[in-house]
Image: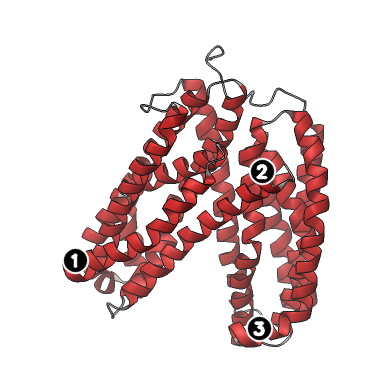
Amino acid sequence: MTGAPFWRGYWLLFASTSAAAFIMQIDLAMVARLGGRASGAYAILMRITLLDVAVTIASAAVAAIALGHAQRNGEEREAIEKTCAIAVALGAATAIFGFFAYPIFLSMLMGDAAAAPFVGAPIVWLVAGAPFRVLANTQGFLLHGLGRGGAVLKWKLAEIPAKAGANFLFMNALGFGFAGCFLAGYFVAVASSIWLWTRLAPHGARNMRLPELAFARSFLGGTFWEALRVLSPQAAMLFSLTLFSLPWQSAANGQRLDSFAAAQTFMLFILGPLITLTRFLAIRLPAKSVDDWSTALAPMARVGAPIALTAAVILLLGRDWIGATLYRQHGPWWSVFIACLALSLPIRFIGSVVRGLALARSAFARLTFADVLAQWLIAPLVLAFGLSANRPEIAYQSLIWPEAVVVFLIWRSLRSAPEEPVGASWPSKGHVQ
């Protein structure tokens, strides 16, 4: 698990998820050419569809973990067919929710008159694609779990020009305008899910099948907790921004808020590889024996720790240059943030490993509890105290100590949890409850 094939699979997953983010940037650039409030409406829609995004990410991760457990029981085909069926159902549920809720949220944020051109057909096509987006993402993670990440990456790279071409066709050539972006997304999602299903067929998948109640309960429970864990940091980041702008903050000013907002954006870029490592370990570990886990994680930490330390040193030395060159930011509320982020990187690397271990053991609720505790209790208290004192070196301890507490809580929870067979939470054919 520390050799070249393992890390090749990791980089394939990282590149695949990065390609998906790049497609969103293409959409935003092409929508902006429409003028008016189009780019703002697109950005707001992407924010209010957080539930859709969380379900898409969570169901894919849980499906890949379930597949890993099923492989140990010789039930690979059944797991693929069941998880894909549940993914479609979850996508349909988010589509129904979005059909009624998204127009309301968009009108609340933009005003009824400004939002009027962007409701109707755009939202219909946006929600119509939800079942296929959830399914395609789940299929992609299943293929990564099967060691076929190269096929997923090839399709993701093909999606980039396909989405750009479909955008031009529907938005410009056929005159659908803003709605054309989402119409293009619908057809690309449909094509993706069909093509990815053909890649799963060699592994025995033929038809989606209705899962047993016990399997569905385990899958939906894991998806709930994992979706909550995905949503929590997004909401916590918005809450942190709110703390910076509260009127009772005597030292509140625009420069301080701008530096924090820019630094948060940069942090998301820096943490991307660590988030991918957590997902990749969660996908790959369940298919292996517990003995393999213990013998692989320590060498992995020895390989990754020097990389994390090197990245930390580079950030410490280059924080002022990064701020001035890329974000036009300077001053202590930028430089101290990046310094604290750098100091936290070794801890966050260990955190990504233990999170992957927790997910592989299906400890969804325990992991979510630890993350939410740090993000909503410890970090805000430290940040608020530092803001009140106008001391960035205090406020940005919220980047270090909450993560250290999470690592400690997760590790203690995993060590104190009673040993059970890997995949016990995923009923097999002979153990349907």
- Identify the amino acid type marked 1: Phe
SS class of the residue under badge 2? Answer: helix
Across the whole image, how many numbered discs are drawn on residues?
3
Task: Assess whether mark 2 and mark 3 are in contact (beta carbons under 8 angstroms).
Answer: no
Q: Residue at left 46%, top 58%? A: 20
The answer to whether residue 400 of the structure is visible from this angle is no
Q: Earlier in the sequence, mark 1 or mark 2?
A: 1
Position of residue 2 measured from the top left corner of the image (x, y, whole percent): 74, 45
Occupied quadrant, residue 120:
bottom left
Q: Is the residue marked by circle 1 packed among few (<14), some (14-19), or many (20+) residues within 10 Å?
A: some
Q: Nearer the viewer, residue 217 or 31?
A: 31
Q: Which residue is mark 2?
A: 281
Locate residue 43 relative to residue 306 in the image: left or right: left
Drawn side of residue 183 relative to residue 344, left or right: left
Tell which circle, 3 or 1, labels the residue nearer the N-terminal end: 1
Q: Secondary structure at mark 1?
A: loop
Residue at image coords 77%, 26%: 418
Quadrant of the rendered image containing residue 290: top right
**Label 3 crowd (10 A; few <14 / some 14-19 / many >=20):** many
Q: Earlier in the sequence, mark 3 or mark 2?
A: 2
Alpha-carbon distance for marks 3 and 1? 40 Å
1 vs 2, front mark: 2
- The location of residue 382, given as percent across then percent down, is 75, 66
Q: Which mark is residue 176?
A: 1
Measured Cα–Cα span from mark 1 to mark 2? 43 Å
Q: In 3D space, how far apart are the residues under numbered discs 3 and 2 (Cα atoms)?
A: 33 Å
Residue 323: mark in rendering: 3
Amino acid bearing label 2? Leu
